[in-house]
Image (cartoon, coloured by chain):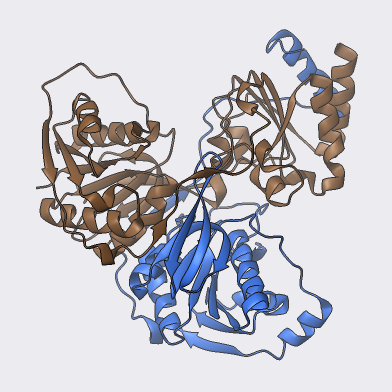
Chain colours: A brown, B blue
Amino acid sequence: MSGILVVIEQREGRISRISWEALAASQRLAAQTGATVTAVLLGADTAALAAEVAAQSVVNVVRVEHPLLAQYTPDGFTLALQQLIESESPAQVILPHTYQVRDYAPALAARLGQVLISDVVAISAPAEDSAGPEFTRQLLQGRLNGNYHHTGEGPCFVSVQAGAFRVEAHEPGNPADITVFSPTIEPAQIRTAPGAPFRGSSQTVDLSSAPLIVSVGRGIKEAENLPIVQDLATALGAELAASRPICDNGWLPMERQVGSSGQTVAPKLYLAVGISGAIQHLVGMKGSQCIVAINKDPDAPIFEVADYGIVGDLFEVVPALTEAVKAAK
Amino acid sequence: MKIIVAIKQVPERDAQIRIDSSAKWIEEADLQFSLNESDAYALEEALQLKEKHEGEVVVLCAGPERIGTTIREALAKGADRAINIACDDLGSRDALGVARLLAAAIQQESPDLVLTGLQSEDLGFGQTGVILAELLGLPHATLILHVEKTETGLTVKRELEEGWFQEVSLPTPAVLTIQSGGNKLRYATLMGIKRAKLKEVRQLTAAELAPTAEPVVVLDRVSLPQKQKSTQILPGTPKEAAAALVEKLKFEVRVI
């Protein structure tokens, strides 16, 4: 077969949005290459989720089921998918670029002599004379794009970035063919013992409901400089947030972190001060209604998503802005 | 505990980017390079484990001649010795090719623990540690913020998405990829910098470790990203730009 396998990820019985995006990316590629799409679910019992996926114009759904897949482990998922891929021989295996996929997919690909093309933002149709599609991914924290292709025999592994592929509504088609695949996994092959997920600290700040957010990044340089950004937030009546490095340094608590490892926000105004805009930050805020960026680097990726930008030294611009906001109120 | 920390030297974050004549990478001549941030946290975790449980910390780095400065920096922070894999074509090897080099060097050492950052800041594949575990036949865990030694192995704190965490227990030897922020990074002391000059750096070459295999994944070209939105840049002095922004916030965004 030369089809596309797409791995659908679930968390607590729900299919994550990025999995639907991975499915959309697979269906678009299939439309260009004429391949068929097979969606894959892993778990101890995936019947209900399989029915939900089957409704989305997927030709085939495979339930990869085993009691040892009830809880995610890299060993269990790698073994199960390795056996499925060896039996199906797909041309492409497409996965959502989640923390879970990052944990096992590189090992799965390596086991089959392959390399995962990770965190892909665009897939272009194969040209007439080319060997296959071209995959675009971001380099240097989003400052550069790179175009990759897969060579040689065997499946091409691709993980897609959150928000990069649009999910479109589907007309209800013929119900998909649902099959069950039972991998062979021995308890001794699972070498890690995962505990139950827990919340880090009590979340006393709910940034997701804040209408205005002023967010600060590495450009602030020192913890002692934070008051100038706090003053702007106070003048605007905004919540103060931060990018990861600020929280890593302990300058602001983790609960004020926006991005893939922190909170996802979509306020009316997101004012980013001294934040370059690495993708891990952008995924947490790019849904904001209005984005303003203040940064000294005109090539900072944050300006790619900003509505308004000021290129300049934040230590001059922010105090001036605070004064102007106070005067306007 | 014998710990190997695989580190990478990457371009400084604020570096001006110019695409080179091959259109496959950027001009490196005027760039400054430094230790990849999450690798710095991996080194810090290793040094703290050594302080608690004794043992040895060995840093491992592959790349061209310039990586020597980054290796010295790691030694100055407290690593005991280093392995330098001379490799001028690191960029044309794919993630599996690079991991094969590192794995071959690690196999000669038989460590109890291999640590590396979760992702490089330049290529950002985020895979080296996981592929290393596969090639070495060791269990692994990724996105780790804290490592606790137990009687049978390790218990680690793993970061999940959206502010969730999880503990994972695994036997040693093992491979962990370290997330930034778990510890406070130390600076090299003057004494550390002096001592680093006397520490052993073992020189290996890529050719002796892993014969160049054809890459599975090939980078065809690089380009500057297209803007997704048309950003309106507000010009002028800081005061003028601030006044212009307040106008926009008041009359168009309507938040003042």
* Residue farthest toward the front in the current orientation of the protein: B151
**Does residue A34 appear left or right of residue B118 in this picture?**
left
Report the front residue among B185 and B148: B148
A105 shown above or below A160: below
Quadrant of the rendered structure where residue A228 is? top right
A213 shown above or below A19: above
B188 shown above or below B253: below
Quadrant of the rendered structure where residue B77 is? bottom right
Q: Residue at x 62, y 78 (%)?
A: B53
Residue B21 visible somewhere in the drawing:
no
Report the front residue among A21 and A78: A78
Percent x, y of residue B100: 37, 74
Query: In which quadrant of the rendered image does the N terminus of chain B lie?
Result: bottom right
Percent x, y of residue A160: 37, 42
Q: Residue at x 81, y 37 (%)?
A: A314
Q: Residue at x 36, y 52 (%)?
A: A117
| Numbered-mark total | 0
Q: Residue at x 31, y 62 (%)?
A: A190
Report the front residue among B241 and B146: B146
Report the front residue among B219 and A76: A76
**Does residue A81 appear left or right of residue B124 in this picture?**
left
Percent x, y of residue A100: 40, 48
Quadrant of the rendered structure where residue A78 is? bottom left
Query: In which quadrant of the rendered image does the C terminus of chain B lie?
Result: top right
Residue B182 visible somewhere in the drawing:
yes
A63 shown above or below A173: below
Percent x, y of residue A119: 42, 46
